[in-house]
Amino acid sequence: MRIFLARHGETDWNVERRIQGSTDIPLNENGIRQAHSLSSYLDRLFHAEGGFLSSIFTSPLMRAKETAEIVGRRLGVEVETVPGLEEMNFGICEGKTWIESKSLYPKELEEWEQNKRYRRISGGESYQDVLNRFFSAYSLIKKKRSAMDADAQKGDILIITHGAVIMLLLSLRDGYAMSDSFIRVRVENARAYAFKEEEIEAIRTML
């Protein structure tokens, strides 16, 4: 079984380089096109391989749900919302650009950047918080999967989530330090990143 993780399609705040975090922003027109491109890519992939997608799970945030629903309609797979898959909460920085945030909160951002794994921006989350709730959500996903019939369990799953979540998983899988993962790992809108089940489990042991 493979686990595909995909970031939602583009939003206006992505274009404006505003920090979205937990703020609920919808897809823009390009984001909708990107979601359709993601669905086409996955459809071609499974037809070429002879495999199938058995489940789609999504973050509750609108931009992720809209992306998931577009993919689900194309592939004929039901979409289920799972709390815990949301984007990292960036607290007082949400709605601002990084340049604006560093101008307004220079000391706080400097301290956060020294230890992103455990330090929080005011009102927000640490990287560790994001990983903890992702794996709580992943445990729930595994339980839901184990309740499916045997044929369904042979299929792959798709999780529609957010940039920071995928960035952290890729960083831990590929051995990048969390301190510079934001620079070294680029997570594109509406692109599927494939993980083996054992890779996800190996990441869990690192926490």
Image (cartoon, rainbow, N blue to C red):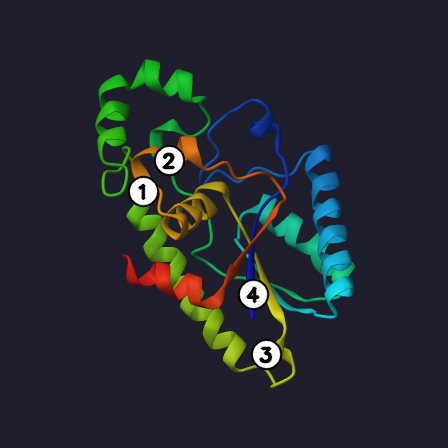
Residue beneath disc 3: 153
The answer to which of 28 and 41 lies nearer the viewer is 41
| Distance of label 1 from label 2 (alpha carbons) | 6 Å
Q: Is residue 148 above or below residue 123?
A: below
Residue beneath disc 1: 125
Residue drawn at (41%, 16%) of the image:
99
Q: Is residue 155 above or below residue 172?
A: below
Q: Which secondary structure, mark 3?
A: helix
The answer to which of 124 and 184 lies nearer the viewer is 184
Residue beneath disc 4: 2
Amino acid type at circle 2 is: Phe
Residue beneath disc 2: 90
Q: Earlier in the sequence, mark 3 or mark 4?
A: 4
Q: Position of residue 16 (x, y in %)?
A: 56, 22
Q: Is 121 left or right of 64, judged from the image as shown?
A: left
Q: Earlier in the sequence, mark 1 or mark 3?
A: 1
Q: Is 119 left or right of 41, judged from the image as shown?
A: left
| Distance of label 4 from label 1 (alpha carbons) | 28 Å
Amino acid type at circle 3 is: Gln
Residue count near mark 2 (Cα–Cα under 10 Å), binned few <14, some 14–19, many ≥20: many
| Distance of label 3 from label 4 (alpha carbons) | 11 Å
Q: Mark 1 or mark 3: which is in front?
A: 3
Residue drawn at (73%, 58%) of the image:
45
Q: Position of residue 38 (x, y in %)?
A: 70, 48
